[in-house]
Image (spheres, rainbow, N blue to C red):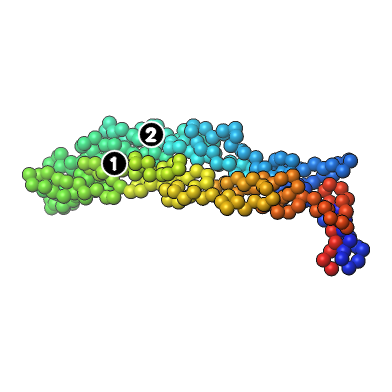
C-alpha cells in the first residue's frame, strides 16, 4: 500500500506483513498473494510450526521432541544415535567375569558379582586370604606379606565393595554400612529412587545415584512436574485468537484479519485512508515526519 506523509504528499513503501514473521510474500495476478514459508513452518500465513514428530522418527521406544525444522530423540536405556537406532549394549560381549550377570545401563554396565567375587568386572576375590601366608584378622581386614620381605601389611578385605564400609562383628562376622543410594549385603545394589513413581502429571522418572530426575511433559515444570506451567492463563492472545500452550512458550492462532505474536497487529494495514494497497504484499504508509 501507499500512504501520504502527514506533512507532505510523499509516500513510503512498506511490507503488508500478510505472511507474518516466518514467510515471504509473493504477489499474484489479480491482487492475490502466495506465502513462501521458512523451513519448519507451514500454512497459508506461515504461522504453523510443522510437527516433525508426526512420522514417529525415533526408534526403539525413543521419545520425540519437536523443534523448529527438526526434532530430537530422547533414547531409552541401551540405545543411542540421532534416531536411537544404535543398540548400545555394553553387555555384548559380556565384560563380567566368574559367572556374574551383566546389566546394561545407558552409559555403562553393572556386574552383579557372585558371593566370592568383587570389583567392576567381578575379577577380584572377595576373600583375599584363600591362599597362605595371608591371615584373616577379622572379616573386614587381612594381613598380606609384602613382596620384598616376610613382614605383613594390614589391608581392607574389600568385602563391602566400593560403596560400603565394613564393621566387624563378634564371631568373625561383619556388617556393611552403605553409602547413600546403595543397598544390599555388600552395598552393590543401586536403590531405585523411581520405584515410588515420584513424578507427577505424566512426568518420566530417571533414576540416579541417591536421587532421581523428572522429565516433564509439555505444560508442566518443577522438580516433580508439579507446576502446571500454563502460558495461556491468563490468555495473552488478542482479538479472539486461540492460545496453545507449549513447553516454554505459547502460540496464538490468529483470526484472518490479525497477525503477530499476540494477534494484535491488523493483517490489512490499509483499512483507513489515505493508505493505499499496491499489491497483496506491500502497502504505502505515511512517514512520521
Q: Residues within 10 Å of mark 1 (few under 14, many from 20)?
A: some
Question: Which residue is located at x 67 percent, y 45 percent?
Answer: 253
- Near-viewer residue (223 or 55): 223
Residue 231 badge: none
Sequence order check, earlier mark of 1 and 2: 2
- Where is residue 183? Give x, y as percent: 26, 44
Judging depth in this view, the residue of 164 and 261 nearest the camera is 261
Residue picked out by circle 1: 189
| Residue drawn at point x = 38 percent, y = 32 percent | 93
Q: Position of residue 277 (x, y in %)?
A: 87, 51
Is 98 on the left-hand or right-hand side of 47?
A: left
Are the residues flagged by discs 1 and 2 in contact, CB closer than 8 Å?
Answer: no
- Compared with 10, 179 (above or below) is above
Label 1: state its secondary structure.
strand
Q: Does residue 188 appear in the picture of this structure?
A: yes
Please indicate whether residue 199 sits to the left or right of residue 96 in the image. right
Report whether residue 133 is seen: no
Q: Is residue 218 above or below residue 5?
A: above
- Per the model, the C-alpha gap separating discs 1 and 2 is 18 Å
Residue 196: image quadrant is top left
Task: Answer with the quarter of the image where residue 207 lies.
Answer: top left
Q: Secondary structure at mark 2?
A: loop
Task: Tell whether 263 sits left or right of 83.
Answer: right
Residue where numbered disc 2 is placed? 91
Residue 108 % position (x, y):
39, 41
Residue sitting farthest toward the left: 171
Q: Residue furthest front?
A: 240
What crowding class fits label 2: few (fewer than 14 Cα within 10 Å), some (14-19), or many (20 or more)?
A: some
Residue 158 horizontal/vertical position (percent): 21, 46
Choose between 100 and 14: the one closer to the eye: 14
In the picture, measured across the screen, residue 155 lies left or right of residue 19, that is left
- Tell which of 19 and 208 is nearer to you: 19
Amino acid at each position: 500500500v501507499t500512504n501520504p506523509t502527514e506533512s507532505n504528499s510523499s509516500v513510503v513503501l512498506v511490507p503488508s506483513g500478510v505472511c507474518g514473521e516466518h514467510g515471504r510474500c509473493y504477489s499474484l495476478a489479480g491482487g492475490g498473494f502466495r506465502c513462501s514459508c521458512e523451513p519448519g513452518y507451514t500454512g497459508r500465513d506461515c504461522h504453523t510450526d510443522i510437527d516433525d514428530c508426526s512420522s514417529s522418527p525415533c526408534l526403539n521406544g525413543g521419545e520425540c521432541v519437536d523443534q523448529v525444522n527438526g526434532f530430537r530423540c530422547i533414547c531409552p536405556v541401551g540405545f543411542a544415535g540421532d534416531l536411537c537406532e544404535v543398540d548400545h549394549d555394553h553387555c555384548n560381549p559380556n565384560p563380567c567375569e566368574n559367572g556374574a550377570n551383566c546389566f546394561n545401563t545407558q552409559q555403562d554396565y553393572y556386574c552383579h558379582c557372585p558371593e566370592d567375587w568383587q570389583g567392576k568386572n567381578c575379577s577380584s576375590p572377595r576373600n583375599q586370604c584363600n591362599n597362605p601366608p595371608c591371615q584373616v584378622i577379622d572379616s573386614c581386614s587381612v594381613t598380606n606379606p609384602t613382596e620384598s620381605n616376610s613382614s605383613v601389611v594390614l589391608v581392607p578385605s574389600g568385602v563391602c565393595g566400593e560403596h560400603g564400609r565394613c564393621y566387624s562383628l563378634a564371631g568373625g562376622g561383619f556388617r556393611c554400612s552403605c553409602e547413600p543410594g546403595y543397598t544390599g549385603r555388600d552395598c552393590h545394589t543401586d536403590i531405585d529412587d523411581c520405584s515410588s513413581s515420584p513424578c507427577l502429571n505424566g512426568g518420566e522418572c530417571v533414576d540416579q545415584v541417591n536421587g532421581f530426575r523428572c522429565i516433564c511433559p509439555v505444560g508442566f515444570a518443577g522438580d516433580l512436574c508439579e507446576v502446571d506451567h500454563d502460558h495461556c492463563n491468563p490468555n495473552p492472545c488478542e482479538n479472539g485468537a486461540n492460545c496453545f500452550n507449549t513447553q516454554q512458550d505459547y502460540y496464538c492462532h490468529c483470526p484472518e484479519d490479525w497477525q503477530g505474536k499476540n494477534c494484535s497487529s491488523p493483517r490489512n494495514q490499509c483499512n483507513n485512508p489515505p493508505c493505499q494497497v499496491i499489491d497483496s504484499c506491500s502497502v504505502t504508509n505515511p512517514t512520521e515526519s
